[in-house]
């Protein structure tokens, strides 16, 4: 079980990086945090391709290594990952969580000033908190899948 957890976590982590940075469309990235149905739909589309990427990574890993995974646990783990990914990527819940935990200033770190495009980078506090939130739940998903 210990080796299964490590293999599952690595597969989920790699899938996360690929899905979040290569597979996600520009439209999804630009719109997933917007209010209303356009934002919800863009986020749901991203989470769908994100989850399919994770499923492909897990299946490839399991088949290549001969690692038996239980379908119910895979479904439960991917559900944890998908739901928490959606919550974080809608932006407002993560911003509110950061504020509630006293990390509101860190969340805003590196955000361009209003009316300026003076920090077009991934180096923002909101990005760091988003990624660490995702990693936490990748860990939980791996525990669920490998248990």
Image: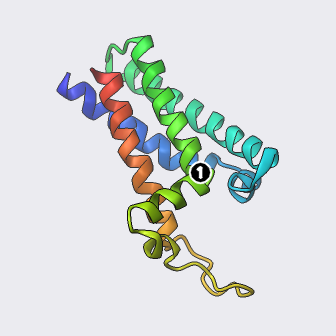
Q: Is residue 82 above or below residue 29?
A: above
| Rendered-image quadrant of the N terminus | top left
Q: Give the residue drawn at x 39%, y 48%.
A: 135
* Relative horizontal placement of residue 71, taking residue 27 as reference (left or right): left
Q: Give the residue drawn at x 42%, y 37%.
A: 12
Q: Give the residue drawn at x 52%, y 75%.
A: 108
| Rendered-image quadrant of the C terminus | top left
* Relative horizontal placement of residue 101, taking residue 107 as reference (left or right): left
Q: Residue beneath label 1, please?
A: 89
Quadrant hosting residue 3: top left
Quadrant hosting residue 111: bottom right
Q: How many marks?
A: 1
The percent coordinates of residue 77 (x first, y second) are 42, 26
The percent coordinates of residue 53 (x first, y second) are 56, 34
- Of 85 and 28, nearer the camera is 85
- Of 87 and 123, nearer the camera is 87
The percent coordinates of residue 13 (x first, y second) are 40, 43
């Amino acid at each position: 079980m210990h080796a299964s957890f490590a293999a599952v976590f690595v597969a989920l982590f790699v899938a996360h990086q690929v899905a979040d940075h290569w597979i996600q469309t520009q439209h999804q990235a630009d719109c997933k945090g917007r209010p209303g149905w356009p934002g919800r739909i863009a986020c749901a589309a991203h989470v769908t391709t994100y989850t399919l990427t994770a499923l492909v990574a897990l299946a490839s890993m399991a088949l290549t290594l001969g690692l038996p995974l239980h379908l119910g646990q895979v479904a439960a783990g991917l559900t944890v990952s998908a739901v928490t990914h959606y919550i974080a990527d809608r932006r407002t819940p993560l911003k509110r969580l950061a504020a509630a935990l006293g990390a509101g200033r860190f969340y805003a770190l590196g955000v361009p000033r209003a009316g300026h495009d003076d920090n077009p980078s991934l180096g923002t506090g909101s990005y760091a908190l988003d990624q660490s939130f995702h990693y936490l739940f990748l860990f939980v998903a791996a525990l669920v899948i490998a248990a």
